[in-house]
Every structure is written in structure tokens, then in C-alpha cells.
Image (cartoon, grey):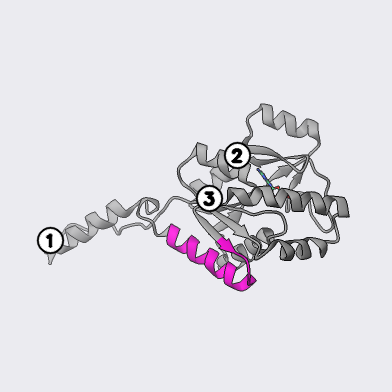
Amino acid sequence: MATMAKKEPTVNRRGLMLVVSSPSGAGKTSLSRALVAQENTTKHARIVFSISATTRKKRGQEKDGVDYHFLTQEQFDSLCRQKKFLEHALVFGHHYGTPREPVMQALTAEQDVLFDIDWQGAQQLRTLTHDVVSIFILPPSLSELRRRLSTRQTDTPQQMNRRLQQAEDDIQQWHNYDYVLINQDFDTTVRHMRTILHSERLKRHRQTHLQDTIAHLLAASQDS
Ligand code: 5GP
């Protein structure tokens, strides 16, 4: 038996970047919220939202700093010039961007970060790092998408038609994503998203202290 006290292996890992995109109305925001709520059952949040900045106006019950950071065009442009965004894009005539700092802090703290962003943002994140996991959510049909969009109280008929037209273009992006889910049933889709998250967390390269663990295992086997 070796007498030297051995260090217990740590099971730290690197946080992952989970991007969820969909055409407008396919349900990604509600799905993402449900995923985060179900995952963070303990005090420590293992997965956090990236709160985007936008120049669009606040809608309904939205809160500044919770749903978005609502900025003026000047504020947005200034942050852009200072390279404070990880990615940014023009969507439906408004600017949206992902603030860099909170994401970096969360990843360093071994938290996963969920990005509810469009395909342009997803594309930009992929060019920054190979460690992006992306999910594309599809509606079961265009008629269902129309039905879901029409139940939103916040859009005018013109905005709704614009969203539908844009949705058809957005759907063409499906092949750029790691996973594609058809949101036929809400609970099933959330379950599938959680399955993806859990599997991706277990990927070898995300278990950053695996080498220590293996060394510990092998050292223990030499002792026995
Ligand atoms: P909404 O204004 O309806 O909340 O969002 C409109 C679209 O902008 C959605 O597809 C949403 O995912 C996308 N979006 C929200 N935040 C960002 C962001 O920071 N970057 C990018 N590229 N898209 C975003």
C-alpha cells in the first residue's frame, strides 16, 4: 500500500455554448426558458441565459435587463465600436447583440450559456469557437406557425406577414445546425433539448479534468 495521500480528482468542466435558433413563432424562447428552469433546480445555476442587447422597443411584459438590455441606436453603436459584443446582427430592422463579458464570466465559472439568437448570430459564434452546440427548432408546419404567430398580441398583421416571409427564409438555415428538432409537442421538445445538453456535457473534451481522474484511477490500480 502506498502511504502518500492522493489528491481526489476534480470533475471540473468547461461551460458550453448552447445556441437555440428558430424561425419566429416556432417556440424557441418558451422552450429555452423551460429548459433553463428545469435544469436549474438547485441553488447553483448550471446554465444561464445570455441576455442580448437590442435597439427594438420593449414589448408587453418585457423587463429591461431581464429579457433584453434595451438600448438606443447610439448606445448600441458605441458598444459595437468598443467590441463589446461577441456577435451582432440586424433582425427585422432592429439591431441585436450578445454582450461579451457576461458570457466569458459564466463560461469561466463552468456554467453553460444558452443563446436565443438568430442564424446570423449562430454563424458568427461558430467562427469564434468550435465549441458551440447548436439546435434549430422547426414548427410542425407553416400553417401551425401562422396560427402561433396570430395568437401573439404584440404584432400588427403587417409584422406577422413579414415574420412569416422571414420564417421561410430562416428555415433554409436548418442544415447549419448540429441538432434539428420539430416542435410538435412542447414537453417532448424540452426533453429532447435536455437530452442534447446532458450528452454534450459528457463529451470528453468538455471534462477538463479527465486527465487527473485517469491518473488517479491508474495510481489506485497500482496500489491494489
Ligand atoms: P424578438 O425581437 O422577437 O425577441 O427576437 C427577434 C429575433 O432576434 C429572434 O430570432 C431572436 O432569436 C433574435 N435575437 C435575439 N437576440 C439576439 C442576439 O443577441 N443576436 C442575434 N444575432 N439575434 C438575436
Q: Which region of the structure is painted magenta?
A: 181-200
* Left or right relative to 201: residue 154: right
Q: Which mark is residue 222?
A: 1
Between discs 1 and 3, the one toward the N terminus: 3
Tag 2, which secondary structure? helix
Is 185 magenta? The answer is yes
- For badge 3, the amino acid type reads His
Asked whether the beta carbons under mark 1 and mark 2 sit within 8 Å of each other, the answer is no
Look at the image and tell me whether residue 51 can be seen: no
| Residue placed most toward the observer, 219 or 93 | 93
> Nearer the viewer's eye, disc 1 or disc 2?
2
Q: Which residue is mark 2?
A: 100
Tell me the kind of residue under disc 2.
Arg
Q: Quadrant of residue 55?
A: top right
Q: Secondary structure at mark 1?
A: helix
Under mark 1, the amino acid is Gln
Give the alpha-carbon distance from disc 1 to disc 2, as whole Å: 46 Å
Q: What residue is pinned by disc 3?
A: 175
* Residue 210: image location, x then y, percent: 31, 54
**Residue farthest toward the top in the current orientation of the protein:** 81
Q: Nearer the viewer, residue 206 or 143?
A: 143
